[in-house]
Image (tube, rainbow, N blue to C red):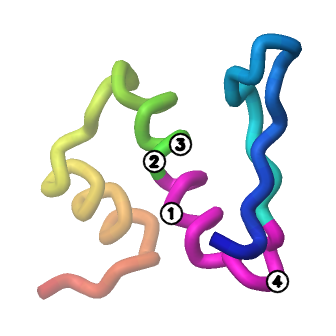
Amino acid sequence: MTGIQYVTDERGRKVAVQIDLRKHRELWEDIEDVLVSRSRRHEKRIPLEKVKAGLIKSGKLARE
């Protein structure tokens, strides 16, 4: 695949990758989304209805 280069250690094992963002920006954005999602995996979740209620109360969302 053009625009992708691997960095290897002294044993030839792939340890890093360089991505040409001009060619593969969408690929990087997908990878970044996965990393952010994984980093937030254990965060406390807030039910959607509670979020909506807060937005309505603050005037940022119209009542249905």
Q: Mark 1, mark 4: which one is toward the viewer?
A: 4
Q: Mark 3, mark 2: which one is toward the viewer?
A: 2
Mark 3, residue position: 36
The N terminus, quarter of image = bottom right
Q: Mark 4, mark 2: which one is toward the viewer?
A: 4
Which is more toward the observer, 34 or 40? Answer: 34
Looking at numbered disc 2 in the image, what kind of residue is underneath it?
Answer: Val
Q: Are marks 1 and 2 in contact (CB under 8 Å)?
A: yes
Q: Which residues are magenta?
A: 20-33
CA gap between label 3 and label 1 equals 10 Å
Q: Are marks 3 and 2 in contact (CB under 8 Å)?
A: yes
Instruction: Indicate left or right for 18 with 58 as reference.
Output: right
The reply to whether the magenta stretch includes residue 22 is yes
Residue name at image x 43 percent, y 76 percent:
59
Indicate the quadrant where residue 49 lies. bottom left
Residue 22 position in % (x across, y down): 82, 83
Q: Secondary structure at mark 1?
A: helix
Mark 1, residue position: 30
Q: Mark 4, mark 3: which one is toward the viewer?
A: 4
Mark 4, residue position: 22
Q: Residues within 10 Å of mark 2 (few under 14, many from 20)?
A: few
Farthest residue to the right: give it: 10
Residue 30 position in % (x across, y down): 50, 63
Dot 4 or dot 2: first in sequence order is 4
Farthest residue to the front: give it: 11
In the image, residue 33 above or below residue 46: below
Q: Secondary structure at mark 4?
A: helix
Mark 2, residue position: 34
CA gap between label 1 and label 4 equals 15 Å
